[in-house]
Image (cartoon, rainbow, N blue to C red):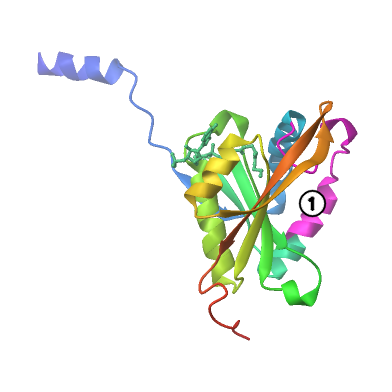
Amino acid sequence: MDDKRNSEAAAQPQPAEPRRIVVRDSRDGDVPAMLAIYLHHIRRGVEPGVDPGEFETPDTEDIKRRRKNMQKRKMPHIVAEEAGMVLGYAYAVPFRKRPAYRYAVKHSIYVHNDHLQRGVGRMLMSALIDSCAAAGFRQVIGYIDAANRASLALHERFGFRQVGYLPSIGYKFGHWTDTVMVQRSLGPGGTEPPQG
Ligand SMILES: CC(C)(COP(=O)(O)OP(=O)(O)OC[C@H]1O[C@@H](n2cnc3c(N)ncnc32)[C@H](O)[C@@H]1OP(=O)(O)O)[C@@H](O)C(=O)NCCC(=O)NCCS
């Protein structure tokens, strides 16, 4: 009887191994997956400064070069991966080129359309903030389309404050769009002079 039960149990489909999402530095091999995630969202118009109708697909070699360049400058360029698949990515770039702004970065974050609302954005944002702070940056800035509720909610959850509102700054899909500028301090922020 016991043997029968055991063999019946073995015949049942077993629950899959719980998958593990890891956040790690991006690699060249991730670029095509990152680009596919980006293109999907661009077509929906989430990127404040990009009109999908006027958009030229970025060159993968160019993205690879920029990725390496940013990592050399200790700016995070990270992916969330599960079972070998890129679920999302995030990176930081200088806020402005002028030297006085060298402690400020601006960031981007994108999650694969099939993996939204699973906590991937939270994992990436947390890792991005920690890496930026560890590298000595003091402020992180984001620009968000005012209609992008998911991104506004994610940023609010991580302590970003709205520091600017640019009405009718963009034009896409036949109407004017507003952009929200958000900012968060890192480590001691502006309360102490920078180290080095
Ligand atoms: C914004 C984005 C990165 C969030 O990623 P995600 O993995 O779906 O988010 P998470 O599951 O980690 O959720 C993070 C928080 O955002 C909130 N959120 C996520 N999607 C939401 C939605 N559609 N509406 C309202 N809130 C939402 C969640 O409630 C969650 O808050 P909580 O932890 O307090 O519950 C994702 O929606 C995305 O990639 N969007 C397209 C690209 C984009 O807009 N990038 C930002 C450009 S500025």
Residue appearing at x 59%, y 41% in the figure: 151
- In the rendered image, the residue lying farthest to the bottom is 196
The local crowd at label 1, few if under 14, some if 14 to 19, many if 20 or more residues have their Cα within 10 Å, is some
Residue 10 in view = yes
Q: Position of residue 15 (x, y in %)?
A: 34, 26
Residue appearing at x 57%, y 75% in the figure: 190
**What range is drawn magenta here?**
45-67
Any magenta on residue 66? yes
Q: Position of residue 98 (x, y in %)?
A: 81, 72
> Measured along the vertical axis of the image, is residue 98 above or below residue 149?
below
Q: Quadrant of residue 101?
A: bottom right
Q: Position of residue 55 (x, y in %)?
A: 87, 37
Closer to us: 107 or 183: 183
Q: Which residue is mark 1?
A: 63
> Measured along the vertical axis of the image, is residue 57 above or below residue 4?
below
Q: Quadrant of residue 163?
A: bottom right
Q: Is residue 118 left or right of residue 179?
A: left
Residue 51 in view = no
Closer to us: 174 or 105: 174
Q: Is residue 194 left or right of residue 28?
A: left
Residue appearing at x 54%, y 32% in the figure: 115
Q: Amino acid at mark 1?
A: Ile
Any magenta on residue 2? no
- SS label for mark 1: helix
> Measured along the vertical axis of the image, is residue 98 above or below residue 19?
below
Q: Position of residue 158 (x, y in %)?
A: 49, 52
